[in-house]
Amino acid sequence: MHKRTLLISVLLVLAAGLFAVYGVETLRMSGGKTRQIAVIMKSGDIRSEFWQTFGEGVKAAAKRFDVNAEIAGPLSESDADGQIKAVNEAIAKKPDAIVLAATDEAKLKPSVDKIKKAGIKLVSVDTASNAGATESVIATDQTEAGKRAGLHLAGQLTANASKAFILKSANGAAEAAEREEGVRAALSGSPQAEYIGTFTSEGTEDRAYETAKLLLASHSDVKGIVCLNEKMTLGAARAIKEKALTGEIKLIGFDSSIYIVKLLEEGVVQATVVQKPFNMGFLSIKSAVQLLSGIKANPKQYVESLVITKDNMYSQQNQQLLFPIVER
Amino acid sequence: MAIDRKALPGLFKFKSIQSSISVSFSCLILLSITVISFISYRLSADAVETNSERYISEIIQQVGMNIQSYVTNMENISTLALTNKDVKYYISGTSFVSETDRRPYEKRISDLFQSILITRTDIASIMVFGYNGRFVSDRRITSLNPNAKLEDQPWYKNARKESGKSVISAPHVQNIIQNEYRWVVSLSRELKSADGIAGEGILLVDLNLKVINDICSHIKLGKRGYVFIVDRDGNIVYHPRQQLIYSNLETESIEWLQNKSSGSFITSDGGEKRIYTFRDTPFGWKIVGVAYASELIANQTQFKLSYLFWCVLGVAVALLLSFTLSRRLSMPIRQLQGSMKQLEKGNLDIRSDIHSTDEIGQLGRTFNIMVGKIRELMEQIIAGEELKRRSEMKLLQAQINPHFLYNTLDSIIWMAERQKSAEVVQMTSSLSKLFRAIINKSEDMIPIRLELEHVSNYLLIQKMRYKNKLDYRIDVDPRIWHCKVSKIVLQPLVENAIYHGIKNKPGLGEITISGHEAEGVIVLKVTDNGIGIPPDKLEQMGKRQANPSGGIGVPNVGERIRLLGDDYGVAVKSEAGIGTEVTLVLPKCE
């Protein structure tokens, strides 16, 4: 009699095993559906090269890691309300993770809390101070970028104790403050440069130009300027060109655009420090995937920035940073 | 469960044949199915991989041909420009007298380039730079970027170096035209003078990089597969994640590709297994397709699943088969074992019901024969024992009645007192013979002659005691005298006849002992003419009930005779007042 029981139990075990395998496999096949990651950028404007390139990085990573990335963002970087709306829309779609580049950290705080409450993994991009609230932060080390800018300026200055100042925009405070800190650290550490102060202008190119012109008039012995963003750089460059001081005054800028490229070619701008938005976009998705897979992602990842000069701007490595290949 | 853990020192030690057969079958089947499945899975997977490699190779070839067609087109354009007389004249050393002389040439060349450009959307620009400082483009008015030095441009330098051969550049931003920064792939070529030796200028044809990007990015090699391009020197020309590679965030297995024109390899560098397939193009680029092995088999899970399913099904069926088979094999053995157990318990009527013709069937038949023999022997032994026991007992019971001895001795005393010495002698001698016959235990069977002697001794004694009351006659066929009968079969009957028949009868009683052979048996009769037996008592005797009144004679003798066989026995015939006839039917033993 027990022979029969043995036989039946063996068959039962086999059947159970078969079903278990089948179940697990089907579960795996259905559960292995593509992960959804919502990416909310500071700006969805197609003219914003930085964010468009960031988006390219996101797309490349989405393909690389086989996830679905949905990219959204307000029309302008100053549209915090538009971004809050975009975050809410993203939460409603119940993605597995959200990559958020907050335009305004204070205003976006409730949205961040909402994302956390919904149990969605959050990766912050380009925001340094919000680290505690998110699992992972992808950012450019702005202090380091500032240091590079300062060091490059110091390298350009021929005479010792050449006077240099920083031109800073009134908006984008957090980023600018870190850059300034870096620049000042570099300048104070090198004997060629003598830091004479940081001057703030309103955010437009015209205001920057006016401020720069005034500063050049009042400080005729200035040999170096570091401008903390693109608009400031363009304004300062205009002032330098107008005063025919091209090459006399070394100008180091941040970020890039076609105008900066031209200024680099002309030699008005000696160098510009650029970020790597493609890498940032890629890494943000990579971090999100790691978080979703339960791998402890590096809580804070810095994407290095690069000093671009006239000499290396057309190198194979750098042209993609200045001239992003963006599918439009 | 059949497997007792403690009784399992070895792997294949089982309590029953069925378990060992089924377990070893199962193991064998399991092993072979697993091995076969694994091998065939590997083979199929390999086949799929090979197919995929071929497929990727074809795609790569297609990509190469597509790009090649663009390059060929650029070459054609360059040849067209090269052979154009206007172009030749325009860049040759000939100095135009004035701007007005130059204009028509410029216009004609520009028109030519323009007409080419209109038909080809993939071409970004066509330009000719003469070493004499003149240049013409596809645009009417072209202003060159004052900050970009022509001589520093890689395409310019390389074309000059190659002197006449066309040069394909890596994708780059073309900054030679003011305010235009386009991603292009440049084909440049030095224009020769009429003698074919001296260079006169450089022709530039720019291809929109978008064309190549589109070709490469729209290739589908699974979900994550991609295409990248390296040039002759192993530099990456195109890669979907070029920037990450430059930043060392990603690596690409380029070193494998060197010094080989085409082929494929599999690598697991950096985690996942990938298949690289690459192919050279005539213009020096190497096109590489990368596919993730896990994606090649589109429904790999299903593939695996169905293998697993059939494997498990096969194992299940095989196990079922092995169980039934082992069961069928071991069933007759277990039946035989059951029969043996029954036999062990003493059931000699057991017979095995195995009717197969194989070894086990033969074993079963032998078993049956053996059991039969055992039973026969047992019966014989039992019967013999019984016979012995009984005859001993009967013999004991058949001992001479003590009263007879006492009476006989009394008679002898009485005769001796009367001085009848002759009679005393005769009686004592008869008594002595009688006793010797009774006491002699050596033989159970004695010739009838001897039995008749005993009886006549007995009768002699009784006749002397009862004088005129008893007479006897012995009339036995001498031909049967030598036949053997159980001893003391007649004496009890005679005793009965005297004590129950004649003693109470007034007048003379006569006892006749007769005997003859009839139909192979011996018939002995003791007849008396006594008072007979009353019918009720006769009926009791017929029922073989023991006679309570000391009448052990007839049943005793009857039982002893019946032990010799069912055909033999005692019959009593009696009629009150007339007499009794007791017939013995005995086997004829020579």
Image (tube, rainbow, N blue to C red):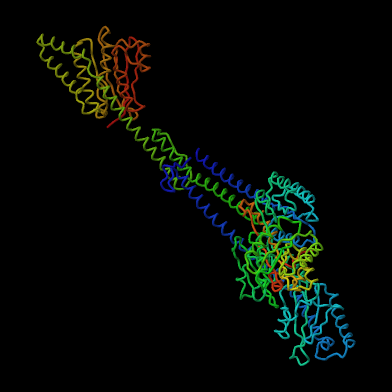
Q: Residue at x 53, y 43 (%)?
A: A7
Q: Residue at x 83, y 77 (%)?
A: B143
Q: Where is residue A9, by image quadrant?
A: top right
Residue B548 x/y as whole percent:
31, 12
Q: Is residue B352 above or below residue B131?
A: above
Name the side, left or right, on which A18 lies relative to B543: right
In-front residue for pair A96/B265: A96
Q: Is residue A154 above or below residue A32?
A: below
Q: Is residue B149 above or below residue B572?
A: below
Name the side, left or right, on which B459 lies relative to A221: left
Query: Residue B223: in sight, yes or no?
Result: no
Q: Is residue B102 above or below residue A220?
A: below
In-front residue for pair A36/B225: A36
Q: Residue at x 22, y 28 (%)?
A: B443
Residue B166 x/y as whole percent:
73, 81
In-front residue for pair B321/B306: B306
